[in-house]
Amino acid sequence: MLKFIGDAVLAVFRVEGDETARVDAVTRAFRAACGALERASALHQERLAAGRAPLVIGLSLHLGHVAYGNIGSPTRLDFTVIGAAVNLASRLEGLCRTLGYPIVMSHAVASRLGAAPLVDAGSHRLKGIPEPVHVWAVTEGAAAESALNLAIERS
């Protein structure tokens, strides 16, 4: 599922099954985030070369349970996902600029990425989340290499 929310995008990688399915979904989500970052970086360079405003993005990854379906009124229904996992993913994305990393993730994701070169970004209190959340990050330079290595490792 893909949902546009103002200047944000919410992508959902559905997981059905055991731990192997969770690792697969996390890997696909991570590769997608790295690919999006790579494309955004190229667009950023084009914009700068053309004298336009920079393009800065932040991406967050989290693994958790959500509820999904049509929400709204009889005159306007919207297919969406809701739940604590969605809120946490949104709050994590807000840390990108603060921490200076283009991709941040929860421990639930980081612990399933295997050999990806992650940076321990510490524990952070997030609005609306009762407990501090341990955050991991990927530097822009490591993102493309990480996605490629994971693609090779998982194939």
Image: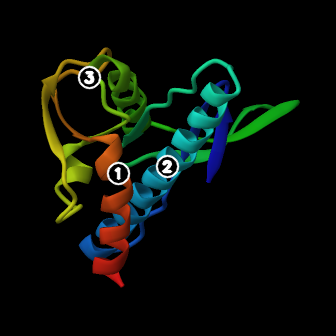
Identify the image quadrant of residue 1.
Answer: bottom right
* Residue 69 spot, x, y in % from top left: 63, 47
Identify the image quadrant of residue 87.
Answer: top left
Sequence-wise, the earlier of marks 1 and 3 is 3
Residue at the image position 37 percent from the left and 68 percent from the top: 148
Residue at the image position 50 percent from the left and 31 percent from the top: 57
Q: Amino acid at mark 2?
A: Glu
Q: Amino acid at mark 3?
A: Leu
Residue 47 in view in this figure: yes
Q: Is residue 109 left or right of residue 34?
A: left
* Label 3 vs label 2, nearer the camera: 2
Around disc 1, counting alpha carbons within 10 Å, would you say few (fewer than 14), some (14 to 19), or many (20 or more)? Answer: many
* Label 1 vs label 3, nearer the camera: 1
* Residue 114 spot, x, y in % from top left: 18, 65
Residue that badge 1 annotates = 143
Q: Secondary structure at mark 2?
A: helix
Q: CA distance from mark 3 to mark 2?
A: 19 Å
Label number found at residue 38: 2
Image marks 2 and 1: residues in contact by CB distance under 8 Å: yes
Q: Amino acid at mark 1?
A: Ala
Q: Is residue 35 left or right of residue 102?
A: right
Residue that badge 3 annotates = 99
Q: Say which quadrant the C terminus sits in.
A: bottom left
Q: Secondary structure at mark 1?
A: helix
- Residue 46 position (above or below residue 52): below
Around disc 2, counting alpha carbons within 10 Å, would you say few (fewer than 14), some (14 to 19), or many (20 or more)? Answer: some
